[in-house]
Amino acid sequence: MDLRHDVAGVGPTLILVHGIADRRQSWACVLDQLTPYRRVVTVDLPGHGESAALSDGDDVLGLLFDELTGFVRSVTPAGERPHIAGNSLGGWLALAMAARGEVASVTALSPAGFFVNHVDQRLTDLTFLILRGLTRATGSRMPKTMSLRPLRSASLAPFYGHPSRVSYEDAVIGAHSLATNAVLDRARKATFDFPAPVDPEVPVTVAWGRRDMILPVYRARRVRSVFPQARVMVLPGIGHVPMTDDPELISTILLGGSSALSRESPG
């Protein structure tokens, strides 16, 4: 599949992967800080943004992983091992690539995959169902609803620590995707297990927003049980989609995480 993507900047390759029902433009607010130091690739996952729908199959995470792995290999210059970062579902995919030793480093922002148990995962599923139901209930009134700042902030609060910083245009696009995205339905049945064994040589950075209402921060305590080498940090005042909340902080974390060196790229 030819995934829609953008490339900007110079330096080591850093691939940025968005979360469920999001799109590559969610990284726009950090690009100016990254592109002087990294060759940044932003991509729409299958079934998101401007990329084609995800192919049929029960193993939705396996399909996404295979598509992303092929894409990463195709956009990385020969002889280079790329860095990757992701948010939410994108964080899970990035960590899965690290587990397989596919990348030089990974930075995961509030990643999926660290549920305490089955009930804990169902709570996240229920959260998405409620938010999707509320969004669908607005119907044709949704653009008007998003034009009213208090209502827009209230609807975005589960995803952002500072929802007032999200533009009207991005809020409308995000609400439409939340209401219609087909991958979201298919991912509800996924187990979010990571590939085993995990490659211990790939540097891992995990940053979690303390105000994350989608994947609560207590799950960060489970990161090192899967990735013992991980550096884990909790970010006060930051929500589930952290780039808009504090672009400078997130840019610093992305640059720091992608400065780590693993084994040399294969010749």
Image (cartoon, grey):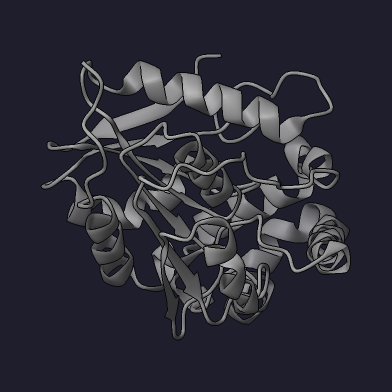
Q: Residue at x 63, y 79 (%)?
A: 218
Indicate whether 39 appears above or below 267.
below
On the picture, is 176 further left or further right than 159? right
Report x, y in % for residue 76: 29, 23
Q: Nearer the viewer, residue 40 or 67?
A: 67
Report x, y in % for residue 139: 83, 54
Report x, y in % for residue 31: 26, 50
Q: Residue at x 79, y 43 (%)?
A: 190
On the picture, is 115 further left or further right than 194? right
Residue 145, by quadrant, is bottom right
Report x, y in % for residue 200: 42, 48
Tell me if I can see residue 36 in this picture: yes
Indicate whether 132 appears above or below 72.
below
The image quadrant where one finds the C terminus is top left
Tell me if I can see residue 3 in this picture: no
Indicate whether 173 appears above or below 186.
below
Q: Residue at x 30, y 39 (%)?
A: 104
